[in-house]
Image (cartoon, rainbow, N blue to C red):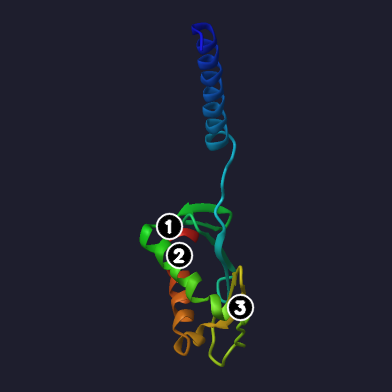
Amino acid sequence: MTGHRRRRRVRALGAGLVALVVLAVLVGGCGYNVELPDLFALTRTGPGGKLTMVVNESGQITCAGRQKTLTSSQIITARDLAQNLVTDAGRKLTIPPLPGSVYYYRVKLQQGTIAFPDRAGTNHRYLGQVEAFALQAAAQYCG
């Protein structure tokens, strides 16, 4: 290969490499907001009105139109809750209000929706954990 042809080939390869790098930067960092899916949407009705919160996989909680970031331990708790509720959501577990109930919860996951009164947590461990999460998150993030 002559020197002239080699230089031309190196320039062509260099230009191609530069184009690939520019394309990678554009795709990776400019204008493509990747949003992670929601873990669950929780609605609680009862005294004090309706509370609605949405928790997503990246650890953001949205309630009352405001988005805030959960702590690391709350993100782990929310992910665990979502995972633990998959079976009940797939079965569309619905427990009607029980005598003495104060609050009623509805948790929507990708697999389905669960609905239950606050007294159901005594027989369903994960439902009690949902109530505790909602209480803490409402006080800390929803005002």
Which numbered disc, 2 or 3, marks the residue closer to the eye?
3
Indicate the amino acid at tag 2.
Answer: Ala
Q: Do we see residue 32 in this rendering? A: yes
Asked if the residue at tag 3 contacts the one at tag 2, i.e. Cβ–Cβ closer than 8 Å, the answer is no
Q: Earlier in the sequence, mark 2 or mark 3?
A: 3
Q: Do we see residue 143 in this rendering? A: no
Mark carried by residue 70 = 1
Q: Residue at x 36, y 62 (%)?
A: 73
Q: Residue at x 60, y 87 (%)?
A: 95
Asked if the residue at tag 1 contacts the one at tag 2, i.e. Cβ–Cβ closer than 8 Å, the answer is yes
Secondary structure found at label 3 = helix
Q: Is residue 55 above or below residue 22?
A: below
Inter-mark Cα distance, 3 to 1 = 26 Å
Residue that label 3 marks: 90
Indicate the amino acid at tag 1.
Answer: Leu
Q: Earlier in the sequence, mark 3 or mark 1?
A: 1
Secondary structure found at label 2 = helix
Q: Residue at x 48, y 76 (%)?
A: 84
**Residue 76: % across, % down:** 40, 64
**Residue 28: % across, % down:** 53, 37
Q: Earlier in the sequence, mark 2 or mark 1?
A: 1
